[in-house]
Image (cartoon, grey):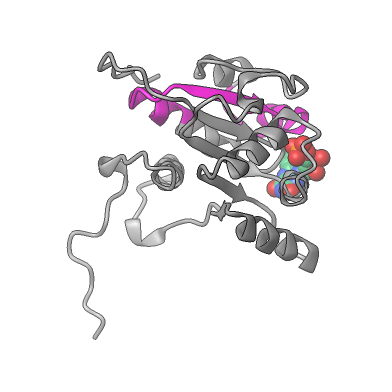
Amino acid sequence: MEERQDDGAEKPPLVVGISGASGVDIAWALLEIARAQGVPVHLVISEAGARTIAEESRHALGEFRALADAVPSNRDIGAPIASGGFATLGMIVVPCSMRSLAEIAHGLSSTLLARAADVTLKERRPLVLAVRESPLHLGHLRNMVAVTETGAIIAPPVPAFYQHPADLDDLIRQTAARLLSLVGIEVPELRRWPAAAPSPD
Ligand SMILES: Cc1cc2nc3c(=O)[nH]c(=O)nc-3n(C[C@H](O)[C@H](O)[C@H](O)COP(=O)(O)O)c2cc1C
């Protein structure tokens, strides 16, 4: 686990949602990087997200929770992140299931994760959805259009091969850093661009 930087200044937290889709280790990397950057995190994990962690990740649910500063229950619709009056940097849902995408796209807010996303949109803060499904049907695509029209950023965890990842962990960390950059958290050492890009001809 990385050491946390602490410059003494109180920063507004980043909200991170983990829903039940493949790719939960991207959330793990994102939580680790946020901690190393000194960014406080309020983390909400759906029931299916917890199951996906158990089925897919090398890390236990408790380890995910330990990387965050607050971990309200997904049923706690009275948690601070359910209120627009609670200032945040924005929210990243990673990975974002098609169910959570649909719920957010239609403003249903039946869980804390969906309510926090809805609040992020209404307060005009950045909401990044790392949607994960393949292939996609028209309903999925329509929900992505709807939520984009409301102000969200659809950012599927698509590998950036031009960054020449050394291995899967490197690819995961680069993907997590890209998601963080979309809410204004820059990690230059993880956002490498090829030093000598091949010329187009
Ligand atoms: C191991 C596992 C992997 C899954 N992967 C995906 C996925 O990649 N995308 C997706 O939309 N749903 C996936 N699902 C199904 C969702 O978890 C399911 O639709 C769930 O109801 C989503 O609920 P949530 O949005 O509240 O997390 C997966 C389920 C499991 C158990």
Q: Residue reaching furthest bottom? A: 201
Name above or below for residue 144 compared with residue 63: below
Report whether residue 136 is seen. no
The image quadrant where one finds the C terminus is bottom left
Name above or below for residue 193 compared with residue 78: below
Q: Nearer the viewer, residue 134 or 4?
A: 4
Q: Residue reaching furthest front? A: 85
Indicate which quadrant contains ligand 1.
Answer: top right
Q: Is residue 159 left or right of residue 85?
A: left
Residue lying at 57% horizontally and 26% vertically, measured from the top left: 85
Q: Is residue 71 left or right of residue 100?
A: left
Q: Nearer the viewer, residue 123 or 7?
A: 123
Residue lying at 40% horizontally and 23% vertically, measured from the top left: 35
Q: Is residue 73 left or right of residue 67?
A: right
Name above or below for residue 50 compared with residue 101: above
Magenta-drawn segment = 31-59
Q: Position of residue 195 (x, y in %)?
A: 18, 59
Report whether residue 35 is seen. yes
Q: Position of residue 28 (x, y in %)?
A: 52, 30
The image quadrant where one finds the N terminus is top left
Indicate the quadrant where residue 120 lies: top right
Q: Is residue 44 magenta?
A: yes
Q: Nearer the viewer, residue 125 or 7?
A: 125
Name above or below for residue 169 compared with residue 42: below
Residue lying at 46% horizontally and 45% vertically, measured from the top left: 179
Q: Residue reaching furthest left? A: 196
Q: Nearer the viewer, residue 26 or 138?
A: 138
- For the image, the number of numbered tags is 0
Q: Position of residue 31 (x, y in %)?
A: 47, 28
Q: Is residue 173 magenta?
A: no
